[in-house]
Image (spheres, rainbow, N blue to C red):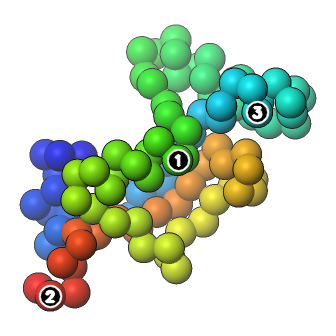
Amino acid sequence: FNKWVPCIEKFGLLLIELHSVDAVLAAKYVGKTTVTAYDATHGFSDQFIVEFDVFQKVISEIGLENVEKHNSKFPNEELTTVSINFLRGKDFNKN
């Protein structure tokens, strides 16, 4: 994302992101979440997916913000494995 920041600051970015779920939480909901399949398929292709809260933290650390009114999380807040996000620079409206 760091390399994309100049473009995101100017235009924003609509992003669909796949997430993992904390292992303790996933164990609590065995058979009720798709996270095991997501972690496995992405792991086999050397991709690393992170939890939604980790994703949010990284976005903030590089100076972007996730516009809450344009976000959706699936299947729910606790077990978010897919999110739709609109990212923008913190000074987006000033351009």
**Is residue 33 in sight in this rendering?**
yes
Q: In the rendered view, would you say 30 is above or below 66? A: above
Question: Amino acid type of disc 1?
Answer: Asp
For label 1, the SS is: helix
Measure the C-alpha gap from mark 3 to mark 2: 40 Å
Q: Position of residue 74 (x, y in %)?
A: 69, 55
Q: In the rendered view, would you say 82 is above or below 92? A: above
Picture quarter with the C terminus:
bottom left
Number of other residues with Cα within 10 Å of mark 2, as a class: few under 14, some 14 to 19, many 20 or more: few
Question: Amino acid type of disc 3?
Answer: Leu
Measure the C-alpha gap from mark 2 to mark 1: 27 Å
Residue marked by disc 1: 53
Q: Residue furthest top?
A: 44
76 relative position to 91: left or right: right
Earlier sequence position, callout 3 versus callout 2? 3
Q: In the rendered view, would you say 93 is above or below 66? A: below
73 relative position to 64: left or right: right
Number of other residues with Cα within 10 Å of mark 1, as a class: few under 14, some 14 to 19, many 20 or more: few
Residue marked by disc 3: 25
Find residue 24 and report its image quarter: top right
Q: Which of the numbered marks, if any, corresponds to residue 94?
A: 2
Q: Residue at x 56, y 55 (%)?
A: 83
For label 3, the SS is: helix
Number of other residues with Cα within 10 Å of mark 3, as a class: few under 14, some 14 to 19, many 20 or more: few
Q: Between 5 and 44, which is closer to the camera in this rendering?
A: 5
Q: Between 33 and 45, which is closer to the camera in this rendering?
A: 33
For label 2, the SS is: helix
Q: Position of residue 28 (x, y in %)?
A: 86, 30
